[in-house]
């Protein structure tokens, strides 16, 4: 029985602007805190190289734009072609949800585990509410999961 207790989060276009400017998407701190409460495990699943991911996370936490625990969050290792949920150790595909703005990374046979988020793009509006919207979608989905 799938219980979807694991969430994997893309970075660029999903949680932040991009690896260069590193703007935090509106509602980021609140959204991450919700993820931590709602899921048993939270991962970052990003095409950005690990050392840069560490820098991004450090910068977000330093500026109080993300909770401190994000610094201990594991980055999923992958081939940079597809964000295969099988790369998440100790979990079945059905245990995992992935929040990503880019469908190209999602395997066709895992598309049902994909939570689509609208890419946060220039001019990086501070009235963007996508993280809130996605949270509501996930809450509704899990409420209907037996
Ligand atoms: Mg992205």
Image (cartoon, grey):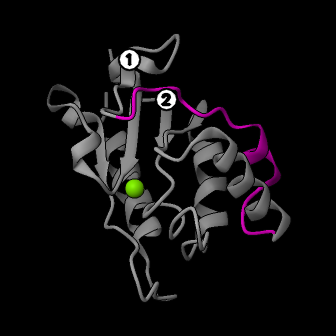
**Quadrant of the rendering where the N terminus is positioned:** top left
Query: Residue 40: percent from the left, percent from the top?
Result: 60, 30
Q: Can residue 3 be seen in this view?
A: no
Asked whether 146 or 18 is in front, the reply is: 18
Mark number displayed over residue 86:
1
Question: What secondary structure predominates along the stretch shown in magenta?
Answer: loop
Give the residue at the far left of this rendering.
108
Q: Helix or strand or loop: what does disc 1 sit on?
A: helix
Instruction: Report ligand 1 position as a quadrant.
Output: bottom left
Query: Residue 42: percent from the left, percent from the top?
Result: 59, 37
Residue at the image position 36 percent from the left and 51 percent from the top: 100
Q: Can residue 76 be seen in this view?
A: yes
- Judging by the rendered image, the residue that carries numbered circle 2 is 5
User: What span is in magenta?
Assistant: 64-80
From what the image shows, is residue 117 above or below residue 43? below
**Quadrant of the rendering where the C terminus is positioned:** top left
């Amino acid at each position: 029985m799938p219980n979807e207790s694991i969430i994997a989060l893309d970075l660029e276009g999903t949680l932040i602007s991009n690896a260069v400017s590193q703007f935090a998407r509106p509602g980021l701190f609140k959204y991450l805190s919700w993820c931590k409460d709602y899921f048993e495990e939270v991962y970052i699943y990003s095409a950005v190289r690990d050392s840069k991911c560490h820098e991004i996370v450090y910068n977000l936490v330093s500026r109080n734009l993300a909770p401190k625990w994000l610094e201990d969050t594991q980055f999923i290792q992958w081939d940079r072609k597809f964000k295969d949920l099988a790369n998440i150790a100790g979990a079945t595909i059905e245990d995992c949800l992935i929040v990503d703005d880019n469908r190209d990374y999602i395997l066709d046979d895992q598309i049902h585990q994909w939570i689509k988020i609208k890419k946060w793009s220039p001019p990086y509006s501070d009235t963007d509410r996508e993280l809130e919207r996605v949270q509501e979608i996930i809450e509704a989905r899990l409420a209907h999961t037996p």
